[in-house]
Image (tube, rainbow, N blue to C red):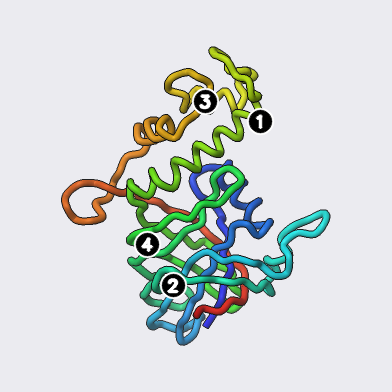
Amino acid sequence: MALFMVSFRSLTNDAITSMSSTLVSRGELVLLVDLRTEGLVGVTGPATVWIGPGTNPRPAPCSIPSCGAHLTGTGVFDVTPTTPPLQGTIDDGRVVVGPGRFVLPYPIGDRVVFLPIRRGRLDLAEVTPAGYLAPSRGGGAITHRDVEAILHPAFQEASMAKVVAVCGVNRTPPMCGCPPGSAGGQLIGLFDVNNDCTITIPEVTTTVNGLMTDDIDIDGDGVLDAVSVGFGLSAVRATFALP
């Protein structure tokens, strides 16, 4: 058995990658992987992988002036599994498992939301006892319903926090108090459909649904109802106990 604490290497753009790295180093974004096989290097056979969020990192991640103390390979974490493990194979240090379900922590602004992944798969490369995985990746699908229920409110909250920080509280059209070319002004321009200098959840839904196209039929009824996702990851060794 090998235990890993996984951190994101990349997602969809540099801004998200930078934020995820910050949240990982502060212990606010933790993705744990429990890998069970008969061996690692030079072994071919069955593999079982549980993947999901972790909490309560020890030692404390941050001490002045730096963070990341829990990422040295000796970190201990708490976990409450909510999905069954993925089944697959290992072949000389490469693990491929799925499809199945897991929960993926995802950074939006300075907070983390938890996305239910359907038809999830993991391809873990260069697995060693030290816990380093690279270049590894995962993917699956998020239902349209979950996108609207989880991601859209988080986008709205993060966007309005940025707008208020950059453009102020007392905003009036047409510039809404936003400096030209500022992040707050760009968000207002993208999401504020009725030009009242405020971004609402329905406005986020209208905009995002116009940009994001469902490309997977989850329930087999012939209607596309989910969005495919993918992510890269790397990992260090960690300790946690699955119930």
Going from N to C along the chain, the mark reached first, 2 or 1, is 2
Residue beneath disc 4: 120
Q: Give the Cα separation between the discs numbered 3 and 4.
A: 36 Å
Q: Residue furthest left?
A: 222
Compared across the picture, whether 184 is left or right of 192 comes to right
Q: How many residues crowd mark 4 within 10 Å: few (<14), some (14–19), many (20+)?
A: many
Q: Is residue 22 above or below residue 189?
A: below
Badge 2 marks a residue whose secondary structure is strand
Q: Which is in the foreground here, disc 3 or disc 4?
A: 3
Which label sits on residue 95?
2
Which residue is found at the position 35% from the left and 32% from the top? 210
Q: Position of residue 176 (x, y in %)?
A: 58, 18
Q: How many residues crowd mark 1 within 10 Å: few (<14), some (14–19), many (20+)?
A: few
Which residue is found at the position 69% from the left and 74% from the top? 74
Seen from the viewer's position, the closer of residues 131 and 157 is 157
Q: Give the Cα separation between the discs numbered 2 and 1.
A: 44 Å
Q: Are marks 2 and 3 in contact (CB under 8 Å)?
A: no
Going from N to C along the chain, the mark reached first, 3 or 1, is 1
Residue beneath disc 3: 198
Q: Are marks 4 and 2 in contact (CB under 8 Å)?
A: no
Q: Give the Cα separation between the discs numbered 4 and 1.
A: 37 Å
Which label sits on residue 165?
1
Q: Which is in the foreground here, disc 3 or disc 1?
A: 3
Q: Position of residue 57 (x, y in %)?
A: 66, 67
